[in-house]
């Protein structure tokens, strides 16, 4: 099967990374694919930046993409901004507090 274009290939990588239902496996696959493209000297910048907004991927792993051959100074700057703008990880609901045992003045 012939590939239409690098632009189309990169778009096909970006779309699943942006999908809210994309899980860890999908995001890691996109990460690996864009890492390979960057290492080859390609410029899949939108596909690199899309998973950077997701908390499922480690920020250090995402920053390593900026060290690959196809990464420019501009991409590194955009990547850093996206990583800093990530929403904080969702907090798990707390269980109701259990009453603490009464302390005696001696153990206080």
Image (spheres, rainbow, N blue to C red):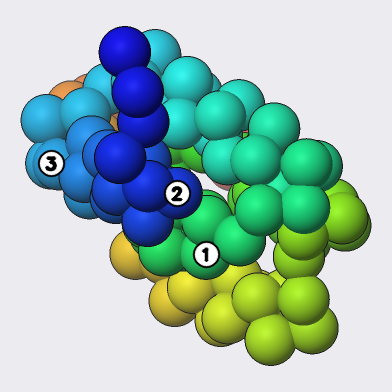
Q: Nearer the viewer, mark 2 or mark 1?
A: 2
Could you tell me which secondary element the residue under label 3 belongs to? loop
Residue density around tag 2, few if under 14, some if 14–19, many if 20 or more, within 10 Å: few
- Which of the image's four quarters has the N terminus? top left
| The C terminus sits in image quarter | top right
Cα distance, mark 2 to mark 3? 24 Å
Discs 3, 1 touching: Cβ within 8 Å:
no
Residue 56 placed where, x, y %? 43, 35
From the viewer's side, name the closer residue of 104 and 62: 62
- Residue toward you, 107 or 27: 27
Looking at the picture, how far across and down is residue 3, in whole percent? 36, 31
Residues at badges 2 and 1 in contact (C-beta under 8 Å)? Answer: no
Q: Which residue is mark 1?
A: 45
Disc on the earlier residue, 3 or 1: 3
Which residue bears the numbered disc 3?
Answer: 20
Q: Residue at x 85, y 52 (%)?
A: 68
Question: Can residue 28 be seen by looking at this rendering?
Answer: yes
Q: Which mark is first along the chain, 3 or 2?
A: 2
Q: Which residue is mark 2?
A: 6
- Residue shown at the point (37%, 56%) measured from the top left: 7
Q: Residue 14: in sight, yes or no?
A: no
């Amino acid at each position: 099967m012939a590939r239409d274009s690098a632009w189309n290939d990169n778009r096909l990588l970006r779309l699943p990374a942006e999908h809210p239902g994309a899980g860890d496996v999908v995001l890691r696959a996109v990460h690996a694919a864009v890492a390979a493209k960057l290492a080859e000297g390609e410029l899949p910048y939108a596909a690199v930046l899309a998973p950077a907004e997701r908390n499922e991927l480690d920020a250090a792993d995402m920053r390593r993409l900026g060290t690959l051959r196809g990464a420019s100074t501009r991409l590194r700057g955009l990547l850093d901004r996206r990583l800093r703008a990530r929403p904080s990880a969702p907090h798990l609901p707390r269980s109701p507090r259990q009453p603490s045992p009464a302390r005696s003045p001696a153990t206080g």
